[in-house]
Amino acid sequence: MQVYDFSTLYTNLDLNEVKKSLFELFDLLFSESNKYICIGLYTKKCFFAKKKYNGFYCLDIDEFKDAIEFILQNTYITFGGLILQQAKGIPMGGNCSSQIADLFLCYREYIYMTSLLSDKRMGLAKLLSDNSRYVDDLSILNYRNFSNLIADIYPEDLVMERSGDDDKDILCYLDVRITIGDDELTTEVYNKVDDFTFPVVMFTFPSGNIPIQLGYDVFFGQIQRYAIICSKKSGFLYVSNKIFTTLCERGYSRGRLITKFKRIFQRDPFILYKYGFLSVQQAEMELISFINTVEVVTA
């Protein structure tokens, strides 16, 4: 497995290339049966249709292209009394910036895969079909020479970098550290701030203006995320202990945090079986035992 990401994506997109690719994509999507894209005025419902519907913005392909072109060509920034028009790249944080970038890359990948099929390079097409991408992060499975294909798939303005150089020990893919052993694949939580040489303040304080319940809800959500990511009980207990200890030191109630911890297993018993816990009480006891062990070692 190899992991790549674009060092710069949004700000390096060539607007003319984006427009050309998106318009060609729209030509594939719209048809006589998909004549209009209907977008709800009062709901989030959206669908293709042959006709227009009341209560929906109904755009044909030309109107939709005009809307996208307007978004691409009408980003303005004021600076020092000047009004500047963005001529390259799309604004980070824009309402549709992520979707525009994702669709652009998706279409480029589609074009490349289509060309492989046209050239009857079925073997390579099959190998690449196992790859996946989340916006600007790519995971490449069972193919070592992807770096040789990057220039054929993506525009040269988009610089892609590989994370690490070991095919079996991946630094990070979507905040997950993946290690491929001889007989197993191990996943752990990866947090880039752990590599920093300075402390980073994370999570809330009960003495702040944010409602105190939010801190407990964040703890619950993080533990739930850890349980999904971590393949081994030791890794799960380690990261659970870190956030538990951090929040306790800030003044959150130890008892309420424990209650939130137990609720994870009460809501999803599968996590109990995943880590070999026989009961919710055993999960609680092992976390407390792990915390006490770490506290003793630290002391």
Image (tube, rainbow, N blue to C red):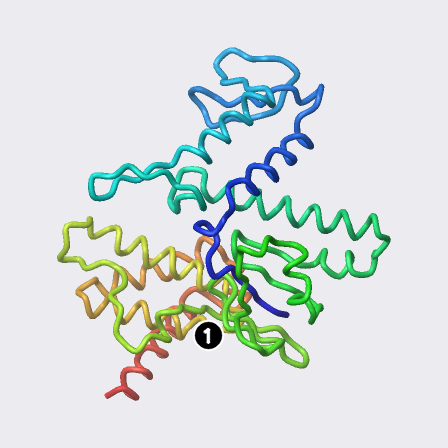
User: In the figure, 252 relative to 39: above or below?
Assistant: below
Q: Quadrant of the C terminus?
A: bottom left
Left or right: where does residue 19 sit relative to residue 70?
right
User: In the figure, 90 relative to 155: above or below?
Assistant: above
Q: Residue furthest top?
A: 54
User: In the figure, 262 relative to 210: above or below?
Assistant: below
**Disc 1 crowd, CA 10 A, few/some/many (<14, 14-19, 20+):** some
Q: Position of residue 184 (x, y in %)?
A: 64, 76
- Which SS class for mark 1? helix
Q: Nearer the viewer, residue 33 or 17?
A: 17
Is residue 276 in view from this perspective?
Answer: no
Q: Nearer the viewer, residue 67 or 45?
A: 67
* Rendered residue at 58%/60% (across/down): 138
The image shows a total of numbered marks equal to: 1
* Rendered residue at 43%/71% (across/down): 282
Is residue 55 in view from this perspective?
Answer: yes
- Splitting the image into 4 quarters, where does residue 80 fall? top left
Q: Position of residue 116 (x, y in %)?
A: 79, 53
Q: Nearer the viewer, residue 282 or 246?
A: 246
Q: Quadrant of the N terminus?
A: bottom right
Q: Position of residue 65 (x, y in %)?
A: 55, 27
* Rendered residue at 52%/64% (across/down): 173
Left or right: where does residue 103 sit relative to residue 11?
right
Amino acid carrying label 1: it is Gly
Left or right: where does residue 281 sit relative to residue 188?
left
Q: Position of residue 122 (x, y in %)?
A: 83, 56
Per the image, the residue denoted by label 1 is 235
User: In the figure, 114 relative to 47: above or below?
Assistant: below
Q: Nearer the viewer, residue 101 or 48?
A: 101
Q: Residue furthest front?
A: 82
